[in-house]
Amino acid sequence: MPYDFIGKVLITSDQIEERVNQLGETITRDYATSEKLLLLGLLRGSVMFITDLMRKIHRPLTMDFMSISSYSGSTSSGFIRIDSDHKTNISGWDVILIDDIVDTGYTIYTVRKLLLDRQPRSLRICTLLDKPERHKVEIPIDYLGFSIPDEFVIGYGLDIDEKGRNLPYIAAVDLEKYKSLYPDTGA
Ligand code: IMP
Ligand code: MG
């Protein structure tokens, strides 16, 4: 184990691969007539997901990124800051907004509103993971990898204080162990 605070593995890399293949097939079908498909990923958590997913979408497409941070540390508040905006003028594009996980939903809710103002031809939401028990706002998720229980998870792009992104599977964090290893992080 590359990290000492990995708890239970919730989703194996085989399960992820199978689901990503299915999502790619569905998106390929849904966008069969689109000539302006843009995958718009939120940095940094969605990187592993988007690079795997794009290989399974057999349509012409473009990739772009935004970098977002929430104002108030670890607890989502609905106030987000754009650290780096996308480069593509999305007007007229079929945009799929891609994130690693929906927790409260504030991030996707806010970014979605902002993107709609920029008048894409269409906008759909794709997320690898969702924690439905934690939602604070209602958002439409068009493409979902997996629903998971209310646990803090890492791997396949997701991190805890920037650690754990390189794991090829999704695992729960053993928070007790994490706190004993990193007492100053406030996790
Ligand atoms: P939301 O705005 O509350 O939906 O928060 C979404 C963001 O919080 C995600 O893009 C992640 O960066 C982060 N996040 C929420 N839950 C987890 C988790 O279990 N592991 C890692 N990051 C998480
Ligand atoms: Mg994120």
Image (spheres, rainbow, N blue to C red):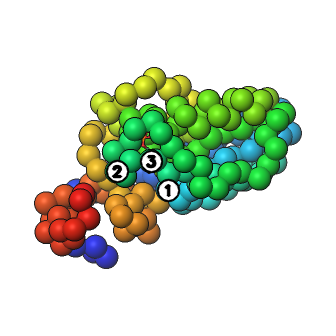
Q: Amino acid at mark 1?
A: Gly
Quadrant hosting residue 158: bottom left
Q: Which residue is mark 2?
A: 74
The residue drawn where x is 33% and y is 45% is 75
Q: Nearer the viewer, residue 92 or 129?
A: 92
Which of the 4 image quarters holds residue 178? Answer: bottom left
Q: Please name the amino acid that badge 2 sits on.
A: Ser
Q: Position of residue 139 (x, y in %)?
A: 50, 26
Name which residue lies at 34% across and 51% down.
74
Residue drawn 38% across and 47% down?
72
- Labels 3, 2: front one: 3
Q: Quadrant of the C terminus?
A: bottom left
Residue 33 is left or right of residue 81, and the answer is right
C-alpha distance separating marks 2 and 1: 15 Å
Is 151 on the left or on the right of 117, as rendered?
Answer: left
Identify the image quadrant of the N terminus. Answer: bottom left
Does residue 179 appear to the left or right of 103 in the view shown? left
Q: Which mark is residue 71?
A: 3
Q: Position of residue 28 (x, y in %)?
A: 71, 39
Question: Is the CB–ligand 2 distance for label 1 below 8 Å?
Answer: yes
Which is more foreground, mark 3 or mark 1?
Answer: 3
Secondary structure, mark 2, is: loop
Q: Is mark 3 within 8 Å of ligand 1?
A: no
Q: Which residue is mark 1?
A: 45
